[in-house]
Amino acid sequence: MGCASSLPDRTQGPGLLNNSDSSGALDPKNLKVKLVLLGDSGVGKSCIVLRFVRGQFDPSSKVTVGASFLSQTIALQDSTTVKFEIWDTAGQERYAALAPLYYRGAAIAVVVYDITNPDSFNKAQYWVKELQKHGSPDIVMALVGNKADLHEKREIQVQEGIDYAEKNGMFFIETSAKTADNINQLFEEIAKRLPRPSTSS
Amino acid sequence: MLQDDDDANSSSETDSIDQNPNPNPTTSIDQSLDAIEGQLTSISLHSIPPIPQIISALPSDSHSQLQQATVAQNLEYIDTLPSDSHSQVEQVVESPGEVDMERGVVDNSVSRGQGVLWRNNSDVDVDVEGQGSPSSSGYAGGKGTSSSSSGISGSGIEEISGDDEVDRVEVVNRSASFGASVDSEWLPGKRHVNEDDASVSWRKRKKHFFILSHSGKPIYSRYGDEHRLAGFSATLQAIISFVENGGDRVKLVRAGKHQVVFLVKGPIYLVCISCTEEPHESLSEQLELLYGQMILILTKSINRCFEKNAKFDMTPLLGGTDAVFSSLIHSFSWNPATFLHAYSCLPLAYATRQAAGAILQDVAESGVLFAILMCKHKVISLVGAQKASLHPDDMLLLANFVMSSESFRTSESFSPICLPRYNPMAFLYTYVYYLDADTYLMLLTANPDAFHRLKDWRIRIEMVLLKSNVLNEAQRSMVDGGMHVEDLPVNPSPLSGSLSSHLGQPRPPLDSTDGCKTLLGGPAGLWHFIYRSIYLDQYVSSEFSSPVNTPKQQKRLFRAYQKLYTSMHDRELGPHKTQFRRDNNYVLLCWVTQDFELYAAFDPLADKVCFLL
């Protein structure tokens, strides 16, 4: 019983990290996309994901090791569903060299920075360049300024984020995983921007 | 200016460096010596009036020469081992106990270096029977207690009740047991970050661990902020490189109650400064594990960074791993696996473990290198691909890494890790998934693209485990714990069967057993035992029970076992076969054969005849 159930799964795709987008393209109404979160450590990548997937916020910081995998499905107004397979990567420097393992084949990259931390904004720009060089050519990129609730400590102005995102053809949004502000909007907007498999197929 | 090593014997002052063919400019040596003096003084601040102790090892082509200044009644010993040799000679030197500066020079006239160890005589309290006839085991009696109990009866010298307490400060409610209740109270993570080497509290910590680079840059410190300890790290580096420049290697410095243990691993230096009275061999093994933990996170290819840039700063690469190291260091005071080099299994019914093993075996046959199912620190089942074997130390480090990294509990993860004993140069990838609060599955592979396949396997494994009730059984076993000495039959013959089934000798009838029944604990006054199977790399220990039921007592027993293990595996004199040791706290019995090692603690008042089986 157990054996049987896992075998069809494996035959659907090659079973690799980067299989998700290709298999997702099969059904235009039920998309399955691979999404990767990148950004400096401590900017709140895991918090964004956990808020989106589980509706939770845990203020105690838990350093991500390697990468965590979560998935969440949302329904859009045009009755399509999008299943996000999310790679929440560790922001630690030692994992930077291994990032291609996680962003390879990703349809969406969400690059996160902390609006109170200019270093994290620089790091975000590093990731954008890295993705432009080595990511999929048709990757959808979003720039996210997180911790928007800490506006009294803000160091990166909204306009800076907007300008940089525009220059690089990215979608931009400021979020707060703590207050849940704009978290769902972020993923909905991304879903709308996904290249749809042509309806003719 | 060249002189014989013997001549150094006659030199009476510490300036003998000037007389020696040291390639370094004298000024820099003096500076580093000054710094060493200063630091060692500050380390031993609370134990001895600050009289500096100087270690210098002099360069020599064919001779290894040591110099040492001894202070008051404290005996230091320095142990150097030239890098080209594994041989080691141990010498026991009398401690004269003078207040004057005393100098000893040991001449090694054998050309390929021999290490020299000076040892305090009072350490040698081990009474060993070499021929392995248990009935004629030596008896150490009261004399043997001198070193082991002095710290206990003293004013809080031993690091007993906790990990990060300050001398003379008792920390209540700190769990240090190695039973089931292990990490219920202890929380991993760095504490006392605001301290540095100028803080009194920092200096009074009983057990420091440092990792630094060969250029003296701090990499990790158990207490205090690494960056604020740059000066201290530089001093440690100066000590190590000073001795290295002489073609020697410093392994141990004893300064009063403190032991400073060094371990050099290429460009990485590891140092432990401890006044816990643990054997220096144990401390050295702990440094090995600490290094292994670092390799597990980064692989040994980190050495290349130092080849490119000697002043490379490694701290950013270890960002967020404080909890991993602090939890490992904590386990040095409760987890017998850290000195036994064996792992322990969760007690389960045969059928339950078979069910878990069978599904893991399927996985291992389909391209997974290792499939490990664990409940906290205990193994439920472990399967390796053909010819792949997992070293118990690797398992310890991997389990520590997974359990101390909170993010694994949140969701399934796929993370690069390196198994230092398997292949220190390469990353493997581990899929980690918590099946419940305590039970987690690790699937290791060399294929970085295997995540989705491993995820599928996990779903299948989880179904099988649920169907065969393994998870519930595991939870129940965690609650029930392992063996209890009280459950052992009081009747002496079953006792000999359960404890010493390998003995294969007829046991003489004992009339005195009746007298033992009144004692606390198990039969014959048995309080606790650890049994290690050498062939299986596994050990089993009894649960703690009265009277060893406070964390303080458990830690004391842990340390006693640790000491016992070290003395049994003495590289020079050992390995020994049996040991019988009695002090104020217990009677300890150790018995080592080719197949197993048995460590047992008895009531100190128990009749000797009761347990000499």
Image: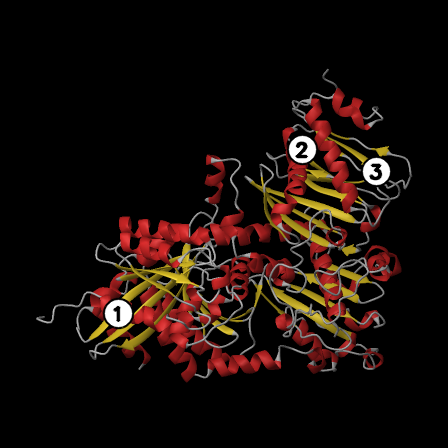
Q: Position of residue B553 (x, y in %)?
A: 76, 69
Q: Classify mark 2: helix, strand or loop.
A: helix
Q: Amino acid at mark 1?
A: Ala
* Quadrant position of residue B217: top right
Q: Position of residue A145 (x, y in %)?
A: 39, 61
Q: Chain for mark 2?
A: B
Between the C-alphas of marks 3 and 2, the distance is 18 Å
Q: Which residue lies under the disc numbered 1?
A: A191
Is the residue marked by circle 1 packed among few (<14), some (14-19), or many (20+) residues within 10 Å?
many
Q: Amino acid at mark 2?
A: Val
Q: Are marks 3 and 1 on the same chain?
A: no
Q: Chain of mark 1?
A: A
On the image, the x and y values in percent for residue A65 come to: 46, 60
Which residue is under mark 3? B70
Q: Is residue B345 visible?
A: yes
Locate the C terminus of chain A by quadrant. bottom left
